Image (cartoon, helix red, strand yellow):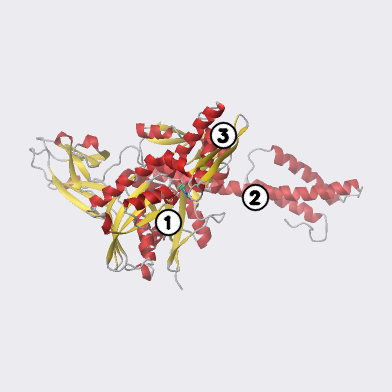
Amino acid sequence: MTIPSKAIGIDLGTTYSCVSVFTNNRAEIIPNELGNRISPSLVAFNDSEIMVGEAAHNQMSGNVVNTIFAVKRLIGKQYSTEIKQYLRRQPYKVVGKNGSIAIQVEFKNEIRIFTPEEISAMILQKMKTSAELYLGTSVTEAVVTVPAYFNDAQRQATKDAGSIAGLNILKVLNEPTAAALAYGLSKKVNGEKYVLVYDLGGGTFDVSILKISSGGTFQVKSTSGDGYLGGEDFDNRLVDYCVKELKRKFDSDISKNPTAMRRLKVACERSKRVLSTSVQTNVTVESLFDGNDFSIQISRALFEKLCCDIFKNTIKPIEFVLEDAKLSKKQIAEVVMVGGSTRIPKIQSLVKEFFKGKSLNHSINPDEAIAQGAAIQAAMLSSYVPPNLERIVMYDLTPFSLGIETTGNKFDVVVPRKSILPNTFMREFTSAYNNHTRLSINVFEGEKTKCKDNRSLGSFILEIPPYPKGVPKIDVTFNIDGSGILTVTAKDRSSSSSGNITITRNQGGLTGKEIDKMMREFEAFQFQEKEDRDAAMLRYEIEEFVLYLKSTYDDEETEKVALSVAEIKLVNYIDSLILWMDNEPGKTKSMYQQKLDDLKELYSATSDEPPAYQP
Ligand code: AMP
């Protein structure tokens, strides 16, 4: 008997998410409440509840401004010009809060603000619940995947989302590495081979080259990608086309109507999928404009023309990773295609053409491979490592160079790009001025020589005694864990009093205190959500019971049957109960329970016989 690992793997995707667990010597996909193997990465709010996944999807067209999608494109980012540009297409409201992104919704008739971490936490929590139902036990540990080029802030924010959802994130794993793990485990590798993973999902594009050895070693050689390239962009091209045609043919402009735009986008996404297997389809939306239906024929050729520049943009990162890994096209043994968008025939033919007609590997499920890889990694990191995973060793790389600012805004690299993870790097620095007692350690990531052209990760002050310039010896240590998350410490060698200082993250990142607060709020929300659900179930039970009793006593009244004292008591109680149900505000689960108990008691008192109705 194999002991199932209770650590799960979650592919937290831009448009869909997927959860898997390693059990019975393989990574099994865990279905959601509807039996589907992937769930929409959607969170919706209304006047009474928060809906996640399928439930959010089902109500989306009637509640577009409060349905949050593609939050992965926002996580770990600042409220920048780039983000504002991207958000112009989104129907939901995003505001800046101290430079950070804040998502504004109407929930329980109040305006509420949520961070991208909190929205992601709701999706992760939903995945966790599906896993708990499937495994019949609580789940507290997970590996969550991110695109390989996610920077420190995006990784940390994803990890924070896990903490808010009550998950201990064992590792933030790169998506192509996860896909390679799933691929490698399903194949027998003799000797060593280079595998290129082409991962085109809903919102992000990732390409990596890995060296897989027969002993079970996975080594990432190079990685590249684009955080703003994916299936959603193809949907948008189709939407833009339809909007133009609507204007041209019917002189109707729906671009300012978020509900119509969202409904059109859903129809376009559906048609895009059809075009992967058919050469022609219709985009059809009922009552789209002025009560009129909209239908337009789209051919595969037209779709390809509309998206051809974006399709071609996926080739450059392939060239880059090959060059970076110093490999020729010929040296790539397999091109593994993952991500839902790799089902598009034109994408397949472009990649095939680039590799001079080489067949592409579609042996792993493009929607599920990343979650499976994450589950394999989760099992490898859990206390019980399944025997067939014991030999696997994995080396991942840092996607960017990391370093600190020195005189003249110079970027002094401490951790070169493509360093193997996890790792610790130490460099000695000194002061540039006499009697400098407050050294500012400014940490950056990027490849440019000037700090102003790279991304700032944070800074801290190290207090030292006054020295002549060049005398102090400051050891700056960069520690990057297996998830690619960085901690920087600095220590003055002669004055041990300063001790170590851990980097404080820039605005945008959550502090430990904020995470704790969000966790408590999240727990309260979960409790409230359960309370609300239970209350709704009890209300339903009462309504069913009342309906049954009303029909019985209405019949007896028409037949003029004399009622007993107990029956009169019950009928009166039912009348007062209906009034209470319709009018009393703020009804809670315990109030409903009390009413149902009273109703059952009065009903049993009407007969010595056992009750005919068993709710
Ligand atoms: P992923 O992030 O890997 O789940 O991929 C989701 C993206 O794949 C979405 O943009 C989907 O619209 C897209 N997708 C899924 N199936 C197909 C298909 N058959 N043809 C084209 N795109 C698809």
- The residue at which mark 1 appears reads as 371
Sequence order check: which comes first, mark 3 or mark 1? 3
Sequence order check: which comes first, mark 1 or mark 2? 1
| Residue drawn at the location 51% of the way across and 31% of the way down | 245
| Identity, as a three-letter code, of the amino acid under mark 2 | Met
Q: In whole angstroms, how far apart are the C-alphas of marks 3 and 1?
A: 36 Å
Left or right relative to 544: residue 292 = left
SS state under label 3:
loop
Left or right relative to 436: residue 44 = right
| Identity, as a three-letter code, of the amino acid under mark 3 | Asn
Which sits in the foreground, 519 or 334? 334
The x, y position of residue 392, in whole percent, is 32, 65
Residue 244 vertical placement versus 167 (above, below):
above
- The residue at which mark 3 appears reads as 109
| Identity, as a three-letter code, of the amino acid under mark 1 | Ala
Label 3 beta carbon within 8 A of ligand 1? no
Residue 25 vertical placement versus 514 (above, below):
below
Classed neighbour count for the residue bearing mark 2: other residues with Cα under 10 Å, few (<14), some (14–19), many (≥20): some
Left or right relative to 298: residue 323 = left
In the picture, which quadrant includes the C terminus? Answer: bottom right
- The residue at which mark 2 appears reads as 537
